[in-house]
Amino acid sequence: MTSIIFPGQGSQSINMAKDFHDNFKCAREIFEKIEDYTKIQIRKIIFENQDNKLDLTQFTQICIFSASYVIFKTYAEEVNLNLKEINVMMGHSLGEYSALVCSNKINLEDCSILLKKRGELMNNAVEPNKTGMAALIGKDCDFIQKIIEDNKLDLEIANDNSPIQIVISGNINEIINSKDIFIKNNVKKFINLNVSAAFHSTYMNEAQQELNKEIETTNFKDNAIKIISNYDGKVYTKSNLIKDNLKKQMANKVNWTQSIKNLEYIGENKILEIGPGKVLSGLINRISKKFDIKSINQVSDI
């Protein structure tokens, strides 16, 4: 059996999925549909980086999702992919929404509207330049959490990406001032991230509550494909539970390490990474060496 994974914010690049758009009618039709649903000129943003919008959270998320969905649907059509052969789908943060659409848990129109709203809410959740995120390289989640607690830092772990890559969220001054503390405690690298706010933290609580109004009215469907939740890293098939977890995702840690460990635990060993970039392949290889991973992000990969 095969699992499919989808990337999140940070994987965007100019011209992502353009070769699919240029070579396949179905890809062009999908872009047109999402643009119609959202009233956003997605192709202008991706292909021309119109007004540098591609790196603005308000637009980044819907653009990455659009590219991922285009690549998935084109690939599925070209290789006659049978969804019954897919056991698990999952994604990193934003990528979880891609997984839900591609697994037919929610439909394309509903997801497009949700992600437009999600991007806007996350972009406007807090005042600009007041909060941020940083990636810490070299130590695991428990180690970083102990440093935070021992030094009484007002910071939260946003992403447990791998045993050697953790992302923290918090007040921007607290993040800047914490760098020396982490480095003195043998964290190898401290990298400030170019993001608009402290995602996957309590700073997102109000935005999450607003988004939940939209999630609540969205129709989720049951089927046999399993979803591994970002919220707790566990495996789900029931749509009501998947929906409940999605309502907690934005304001809580992305449990990617645990998600991959659970993917391994249920016996999966083949992964297709579908969407722009190959970030997730690198993270997964740091969590486990037991997976055969293939990335599909350009036409030549089909």
Image: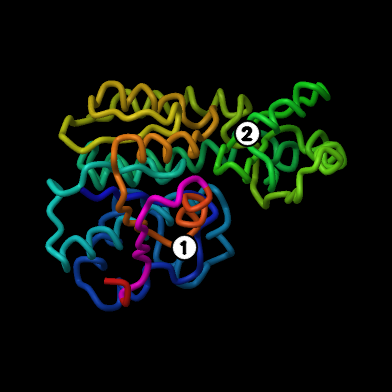
Q: Is mark 1 on a helix, strand or loop?
A: loop
Residue 232 painted magenta: no
* Comparing labels 2 and 1, the label whose residue is closer to the camera: 2
Q: Is residue 237 left or right of residue 257?
A: left
* Place of residue 27 in the rendered image (x, y in percent of width and height, measured from the top left): 25, 66
Closest to the observer: 245 or 280?
280
* Place of residue 204 in the rendered image (x, y in percent of width and height, measured from the top left): 58, 29
Closest to the observer: 226 or 48?
226
Cα–Cα gap, marks 2 and 1: 24 Å
Q: Considering only vertical position in the picture, is 103 above or below 247?
A: below
Query: Residue at (46%, 30%) from the top-left corner?
Result: 249
Q: What residue type is labelled 2?
A: Cys
Q: Mark 2 points at which residue?
A: 141
* Place of residue 71 in the rendered image (x, y in percent of width and height, measured from the top left): 30, 62
Pointer 2 local density, CA inside 10 Å: few below 14, some 14–19, many at least 20: many
Q: Considering only vertical position in the picture, is 63 above or below 174?
A: below
Q: Name the residue under label 1.
A: 277
Mark 2 and 1 residues: CB-CB less than 8 Å, in contact?
Answer: no
* Place of residue 193 in the rendered image (x, y in percent of width and height, measured from the top left): 68, 50
* Quadrant holding the C terminus: bottom left
Residue 76: image quadrant is: bottom left
Q: Is mark 2 on a helix, strand or loop?
A: helix
Single out the residue that lies furthest toward the front. Answer: 290
Q: Which numbered circle lies on residue 263?
A: none
Q: Which of marks 2 and 1 is nearer the N terminus?
A: 2
- Range drawn in magenta: 287-299
Query: Residue at (68%, 41%) from the top-left corner?
Result: 139
Q: What residue type is labelled 1?
A: Gly
Closest to the observer: 208 or 72?
72
Pointer 1 local density, CA inside 10 Å: few below 14, some 14–19, many at least 20: many
Residue 295 painted magenta: yes
